[in-house]
Image (cartoon, rainbow, N blue to C red):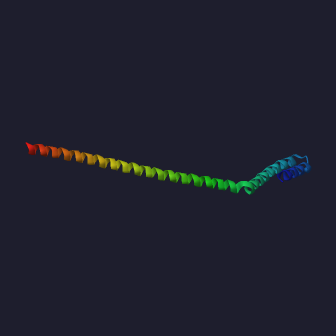
Amino acid sequence: MRLVLTSDDDDDDNEDGDCDDDDDDEDDDDDDNDVMMMIMIHDEDDVDGGDDDIMMMMMMVTTTAIMMLIMIVMMMMMMMMMMMMMMMMMMMMMMMVVVVVVVALLCVVNTSQQS
């Protein structure tokens, strides 16, 4: 369809005349033909696969957004787990220190009582 339109326009331009003004008009007509070709190509793309491309882009964006959200949630979970582990380690260390201090005090009290 595009080729038929452009060939017809070119024939009309050749039939117009040989004057310089007509040559300028031919150049203008060629520009118009290019614009028409561009518009028609654009329309054909929209009719053929524009919606599919848009759907693909939307799917890609949604999938990437979901992946980013999952990654952020996983990172938050990992941070929470690390914080919990650190807290538990600190609690264990404190408990160990308290137990050691209590045992040492008991030993000192027992030795002082024995003596």
- The one nearer the camera, 30 or 52, is 52
Q: Which of 78 and 54 is in front in this view?
A: 78
15 vs 64, left or right, is right
Q: Which residue is drawn at 33% across and 47% down?
A: 89
Q: Quadrant of the N terminus?
A: bottom right
Q: Check the image and name the residue furthest to the left.
A: 115
Which of the pair 3/15 is nearer the observer? 3
Point out residue 9 in the picture as x, y percentages from the top left corner: 86, 52
Identify the residue shown where x is 46% and y is 50%. Answer: 75
**What residue do we see at 65% from left, 53% from top?**
56
Where residue 7 appears, as percent x and y from the top left, is 87, 50
Q: Is residue 106 left or right of residue 90?
A: left
**Number of marks in picture:** 0
Residue sitting at x 68%, y 53%: 53
Seen in the image, is 108 located left or right of residue 49? left
Q: In which quarter of the image is the C terminus?
A: top left
Q: Picture coordinates of residue 82 (x, y %)?
A: 39, 48
User: In front here: 22 or 90?
Assistant: 90
Q: Where is residue 66 in the image (x, y as percent from the top left)?
A: 55, 54
